[in-house]
Image: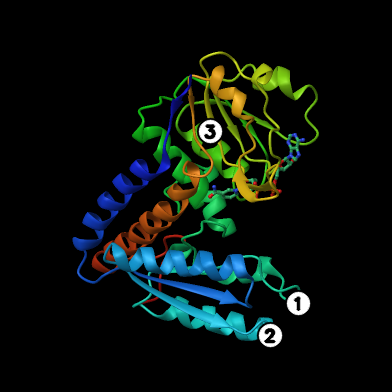
Amino acid sequence: MATRLSGPPAAEALLAQTARRAAALATPPHLVIVRVGEDPASVSYVRGKAKKAGEIGLRGTVHALPDTTPQAELLALIAGLNADPGVHGILVQLPLPGHIDPAPVLEAIDPNKDVDGFHPVNVGRLWTGQPALSPCTPAGIMALLAHYEVQVAGKVVVIVGRSTLVGRPLAALMLGADATVTLAHSRTRDLAAVTRGADVLVVAVGRAGLITPDMVRPGAVVVDVGINRVLDDAGKAHLTGDVHPDVSQVAGALTPVPGGVGPMTVAQLMANTVQAAERQADRRAAPIPGVLGEHAH
Ligand code: NAD
């Protein structure tokens, strides 16, 4: 039976460390979350993130805008937040309403305040090995593996799913940690042959039961990122991952869904906010003119 890599203890450890770092700063790190419209999942995610910030000594502010908000108005709000030295992290909750193009909105955020790590400058910094704000789910996966002392250096890591949210940035983080990385996706030929080669298998697809026991090398570490809403025999909805439950008979260690990667994502957002605040404080103490992304203030 696979060891259970439970998210909450790892998330608590990351939050405790983050709270200590926050307390060492002159002012509490301030995270501003912008939500446009009333998508029920977004409303709940945003509330959860702001609440968690308050619990660990950060400031969390939510700007909730109507779903008719023009793109220009959203861009003006972001410009104001960028210029405000009292704001350290800015997160625009996705998805945005259909009339707003997400790319220019994400690119409008100051890369040094981009706590979701989606700005192309942060993507570039991540892939070139420079200090970067990294997307929260993949960075949270690295923190989860570190918490359970799962080594990735020199290991074969196979990631299934190539989204800009999870798979691609996780590939960059794994490369940075000296893993040998394969990124598989919907067009991969003979997926089972690829996944069987993994010492560490990460699955971020969004398809319940995609990974079956025959696709996993005995003893492998399996990280299940998928979140799927399925109906049981009684017609009751519950959450399940991308990994079939029988994989626990083969794997050496496995993250559960729910209660695995999920809690790490919010904890990592708090860590990113503190990281952004620390770097902004350092830059104000010792400004280096001309450095990429340097603030005017
Ligand atoms: P996405 O839809 O953007 O990407 C899915 C990826 O899976 C694509 O790259 C696609 O090529 C690949 N894929 C699709 N079908 C496949 C198949 N049959 N075989 C192999 N690859 C296939 O999804 P995403 O945003 O990366 O999210 C993936 C899953 O992770 C979803 O279930 C999402 O809910 C979950 N998720 C969880 C968290 C968390 O905090 N736990 C965070 C983000 C996403």
Q: Are marks 1 and 3 in contact (CB under 8 Å)?
A: no
Q: Which residue is at 78% across, 36% downward?
A: 186
Q: Which residue is at 59% across, 23% downward?
A: 247
Task: Between residue 194 and residue 87, name the one nearer to us.
Answer: 194
Name the mark on residue 223: 3
Residue tagged 2: 70
In the visual, does 172 lie left or right of 208? left
| CA gap, disc 1 and disc 3 | 35 Å
- Disc 3 beta carbon < 8 A from ligand 1? no
In the visual, does 1 lie left or right of 189? left
Specify the quarter for ligand 1: top right
- Give the residue type that dot 3 points to: Val
Q: How is the image coloured?
A: rainbow
Q: Which residue is at 60% across, 65% downward?
A: 41
Residue tagged 1: 99
| CA gap, disc 2 and disc 1 | 8 Å
| Residue 94 horizontal/vertical position (percent) | 62, 65
Other residues around mark 1 within 10 Å, as few (<14) / some (14–19) / many (≥20): few
Determine whether 126 is above or below 186 in the image.
below
Is disc 1 placed on a helix, strand or loop? loop
Mark 2 or 1, nearer chain start: 2
Q: Do the residues labelled 2 and 1 touch (CB within 8 Å)?
A: yes
Give the number of the mark in front: 3 or 2.
3
Mark 3 or 2, nearer chain start: 2
Task: Between residue 296 and residue 139, name the one nearer to us.
Answer: 139
Other residues around mark 2 within 10 Å, as few (<14) / some (14–19) / many (≥20): few
| CA gap, disc 3 and disc 2 | 39 Å
- Give the residue type that dot 1 points to: His
